[in-house]
Amino acid sequence: MASGCEVAADPGGRNAGAGLCVDTKSAKSGGEYVMVWLRKDVRFLDNEALSEAVRDAKRVGAKVLLAYFYEEDIVQRPDFASCHLKFVNEGLREFSAKAESLGGYLITKKGTLPNLFEQLLTTNSEGEDTVFRLKAIYTHEETGNSAMRLRNERVATWSKKAGVQVKYFNQTGVTKNLTTRDGWAKKWRQLMDRPSSKPPETLRGLCINADSAGLLWEEELGVFRDRKPEAACGGESLALELLKTFTEGKRSVGYGKNVSSPNTAWEGCSRLSPYLTWGHISLRTVYKTVKRLRERLKQDKALKASAQSSWARDLSSFEARLRWRSHFMQKLEDEPSMETENLCRAYDGMRDRHFMDGDGAIGKKENETASNADMQNRRASQQKFAAWCTGNTGFPMVDAVMRCLLLGGWINFRMRAMLVSFASYTLWLDWRETSKFLGKHFLDYEPGIHYPQFQMQSGTTGINALRIYNPTKQVTDHDKEGTFIRRYVPALSEVPKRYIAEPWKMPEAVQKKSGCIIGEEYPPPIVDQSAAYTFARKRIGDIRKQEKSKEESKRVYVKHGSRKRPSDRRSVRKTKASPAESISQVDSNAESSHGKSESGNHGSRVNSRTKKKRKKLSRFPGA
């Protein structure tokens, strides 16, 4: 390419197929380098940014700098936590060791962007005099939170001014600047079916060994140290091993059935979600591995005979969830305000979004007009929130799930959906506060999935069926023996099976015998479940009847609704697990227009026509 060509920043990734704008004459003198900006792509296998940077650098005689930045404005946000940092660092440690084995180096720095880019406009390897100038940055696109979006805007402005090209590569199938959802799924499959990027065979003599901060931990980054003793460890090799056991090791057999219960999900789910979130494995690698196995099952009779007849359907179900993962990320990409505002604005004001302000009193501006009832409601909401956050609501399944999450950072989708549904409907807490809390505790926290899912489970999208999970029914459906509950709520370990779902119904003598006095060893229910259900149904139902709500719902569907035809989902529907399962993870439910209320005994409120429809759709696990 000719010297002095125009260099333009492209935060939308539209230049991903363009050639590298490097001054060849200058590069031959050893004066230029390209940077691989590692973000959520800390891996060697199928890392297009890494492969393309190395290829282009070799072509023009430039150097390569492998860099990861601890961005202070991002790691100090409330949705970034100690468990995330540990997982990230474990991936970086393995990546660095691999780079060194190939003759390369990984450097890290702490600060903000683009300030760190500016500092690295010129750099040199330790112990060498040759100075190299930065000419291009290679990285993958991301669908991030508001801090990440602001950083991307700053980088775009800086790169244009500095004359540094930023090349973005698509690794999730999310489309920047999307104008219509029509044909989206087809484009996603085309991206996933593209050849995987091969890792470089060597980095020897190619990488710049610049000054590095090494691995930084909580104390150095201002992150509160709160490790999770049961959390998974990060790293590309662990991700690939999990994928292998899920496919070749046949953990995926029975997937459609095993995803719902917290007892079977530990082995029955892929457990790949945090590795996909932080980029320790690519979505394409997972998709292609599963697809190849599914195709083998059609040809290899011996393989097919070695497992349950449902295996092919299980794999199809999982494959569909990979697509729905990206489908939800596309929602936040298209409407970033979803992170802080109701998707359907007709629901604005439905819940108190500021219930955590101050010490429980109404804010200063509201204080003059606030009634005692308003102030009491806010204090009550804070108490409910505290009980929910610590797993002390008095509802065993809710408390066990929350305590499990606090210890390990992972739980299967149905239980996540129940946690959110319980907070939003039963406790009537605004999703903006509860989403922040779970965001920092989900090891696989992915903003693009997190916020759309939270709104879906809170009833504020305007296009999804109302889903009110009954935590008592979840016990009878998915933990009938109380195995999961007894593990994470020790106070209930001796409670008879008969009362494990509703321990508050134990007679006094049974409470004493089991060593669990309600109100002492374990709290009573924090709310009346039946009354809360009735209130939530009526409140949301009244809003849905309004013309404003109907018009808003149409707008939301046009912009965000799935375009997949029912016939396209048929193979998945037979699996007892709709592709509708995906909250911050692959092993989960994402969206279904057929979802029904998980209301247990409250089902008698539904008319007979609806009951018939639900019976027909009972094969959906999310239903």
Image (spheres, grey):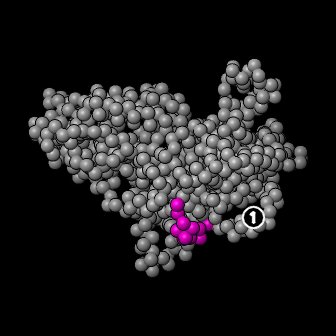
**Residue 163 locus on image (x, y percent):** 24, 34
Which of the 4 quarters of the picture holds residue 571?
bottom right
Quadrant for the C terminus in the image: bottom right
Can residue 594 be seen from the camera position used here?
yes
**Residue 281 locus on image (x, y percent):** 40, 52
**Residue 67 locus on image (x, y percent):** 31, 37
**Residue 154 within the segment the image draws in magenta:** no
For this rendering, which residue is in front, 38 or 425?
A: 425
163 w.r.t. 300: above or below: above
54 w.r.t. 73: above or below: below
Q: Amino acid at mark 1?
A: Thr
Which of the 4 quarters of the picture holds residue 611?
bottom right
SS under mark 1: helix
For this rendering, which residue is in front, 456 or 391?
A: 456
Which residues make up the magenta segment? 563-576
* Residue at x 53%, y 36% (from the top left corner): 79
Q: Residue furthest bottom?
A: 301
Q: How many labels, in total?
A: 1
* Residue at x 33%, y 47% (from the top left corner): 14
Quadrant for the N terminus in the image: top left
For this rendering, which residue is in front, 493 or 31?
A: 31
Can residue 403 be seen from the camera position used here?
no
* Residue at x 47%, y 45% (from the top left corner): 333
> Is disc 1 surrounded by few (<14), some (14 to 19) or many (20+) residues within 10 Å?
few
* Residue at x 21%, y 42% (from the top left corner): 21
Q: Label 1: which residue?
A: 610
**Residue 567 within the segment the image draws in magenta:** yes
Which of the 4 quarters of the picture holds residue 587?
bottom right
Would residue 428 appear left or right of 99 to someone viewing this image? Answer: right
**Residue 580 locus on image (x, y percent):** 58, 58
